[in-house]
Each structure stands twice: as C-alpha cells, then as structure tokens.
Amino acid sequence: MQRRQILSLLALAALGPNAGTGALAAAGDAPPLMLANVYRPGVTRLADYWVSEKYDGVRGYWDGKLLRTRGGERIAAPEWFTAGWPNVPLDGELWAGRGRFSHAVSTARQQTPIDAAWHDMRFMVFDLPAHGATFTERITAYQQLLAQLDVPWVQPVAQRKVASDAALQTLLRQTVKAGGEGVMLHRGDSLYRATRNDDLLKYKPYDDAEARVIAHVSGQGKHTGRLGALLVQTHSGLQLKLGTGFTDAQRAAPPAVGTWVTYRYRGTTDKGVPRFASFLRVREDWTPAARADAR
C-alpha cells in the first residue's frame, strides 16, 4: 500500500461520527474554518483551554487535494511541498519564521512557485477540521498523523496548559520577546465549528485591525517632502490618521491609495475610536471578504 494511502487511512480511522460533514470545500469556495474571538483577561476558565503560539503567517487549508487560502484561492505551492499529504483536511499556518510575515505572504501569493522561497516555508498544523472528536483528542490525532507523514516542513503546533492568568501573561511576554505575535487559546472539549466563537481565542499585547488608504498627508519638520500620515478608512466607514510606525523607506514610498493596511491600537474611546493607532504593515493578502489572519 502506498504511503499516502496509509496516511489517509490513519487519519480517517481517528475521525469520529461527524467526520467529513461539510469539511471539504468545493474548488473556489471559502473553506469552512473555525475563527477566533479575542481573549480578555479574567473572563475565561483557563483550565479548560490549551495554549499555543500564534504564528504570524498566512492561514492555509489543505482540503485533501489542494492547499487554499482562507478565502478559497488556490495556493500554488510546488508539487514537492504537498507530495504525499493525506487526503483529509488540515488546518494550519503557512509560516516562514518569526518576523518574516512579508516573506510568507509574498511566497503564498506567487502564481508560479519559487522553489527557493518555499524552502523557507513551513506548514504549522493546528487542527483537523473533519475530525469528529474534541480538540484534546484532535491534538493527539494530528500529532500522530504528522509523525507518520514525517515531512520536515509540515509540523504540529505544540499545545500546553497554563495554570493561571499570571502564567498566561508570562507566556505571552516570553513569546512576544522571542519575536512571536501572541498566543492562541483553544477549548479542550470543543468540536470543530466553522464559525467565529469563544472556543478559539487569540491573545496579543495589542489590538489590530485593517483599513484602506484613502489619502496621503504630507509631512512637516523632519518629514517635509515625505509622508506625514496615512488617512485610512475602516470597513465600517471610520476614518483616522496613522502617523507613526513607518520606516524611512515607507515614508519615502508610502502604500498607494486603495491599499489595505494593518494598524495596531490599544483599546478604543467611548465613541469607538481606536486609541494610539499606528501603522503596522501593508496587508497585501487581505480583502474585506477574505482575511488571512483568520485565527
């Protein structure tokens, strides 16, 4: 029996009675993904959750045959990258390492794959969407499946438990200090539900959101002749200025009008306006209908 068949049988054997119910997406359709809400300290029973690093890459969904984005677009990975993968869905993150988000995005967007770029990529698997058991059981299942696959660039996301909010805060600080984006919390007794819910939570040291550039504001003083700020508009219609967070190169050649960008902020005012908003990065992989940062 061929290796791919063995892996597929191994995966299917672990699937419960709900296996395969709507988990495979038709070509071009957005895959049915589980999406995360935002964690707020003190509102969650931490003992119920597994915690993992939040990888800063591009959400990837292997539907059993093809690798797709959150929006359903096919990712043109080299044949060797997905050779031998099982014919059951895998949910994960295409990741190029800490601090290399731009590399992950540009590599995943190439219609003609560049081998050298893909050799720097990893597929970090954190769930089995078609598995009918709880997340705690799915952890064991995806770890066993990937151990059998034995491909260096396909890796299981490590999960751990934390005893208290203080321990979670310590883990978050350590992860961010090491270059990580944040952490994810996944309820151990939850099933895979293709909706945004509190069974999956993301926790970062800041909030972030997307907005579209609608104008460039000229700089003054040391920024005379360069970008001073971006005037952006969120998908809800709110307009705000982003005046910090840019490199010198970005001030000299700012994101074009119409470009979607990610900005970070710390909470909102009573009127819902983001506080201390600053530019984070261009979001080339993002549209209002399909956001790569799905977790």
Image (spheres, rainbow, N blue to C red):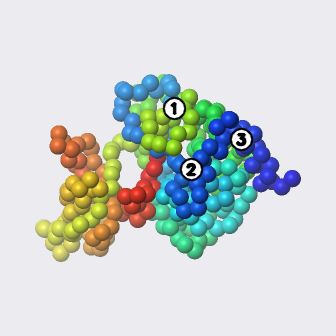
CA gap, disc 1 to disc 2?
Answer: 17 Å
Taking depth in this image into account, of 226 and 28 the one nearest to the observer is: 28
Coordinates of residue 35 in the picture (x, y in percent):
46, 44
Reading the image, the residue beneath label 3 is: 144
Give the residue at x 33% y 56%: 210
Give the residue at x 41% y 27%: 44
User: What kind of residue is marked 1?
Assistant: Arg
Question: In the picture, residue 173 is in which quadrant?
Answer: top left
User: What kind of residue is marked 2?
Assistant: Gly
Q: Residues within 10 Å of mark 1 (few under 14, many from 20)?
A: many
Query: Earlier along the polypeptide chain: callout 3 or callout 1?
Result: 3
Coordinates of residue 128 in the picture (x, y in percent):
62, 43
Q: Residues within 10 Å of mark 2 (few under 14, many from 20)?
A: many
Taking depth in this image into account, of 128 and 175 the one nearest to the observer is: 128
Taking depth in this image into account, of 48 and 161 the one nearest to the observer is: 48
Reading the image, the residue beneath label 2 is: 92
Q: Which mark is residue 228?
A: none
Is label 2 in a helix, a strand or a loop? strand
- Asked if residue 187 can be seen in this view, the reply is yes
**Image height of 289 relative to 106, above or below:** above
Residue 254 is left or right of residue 15, and the answer is left
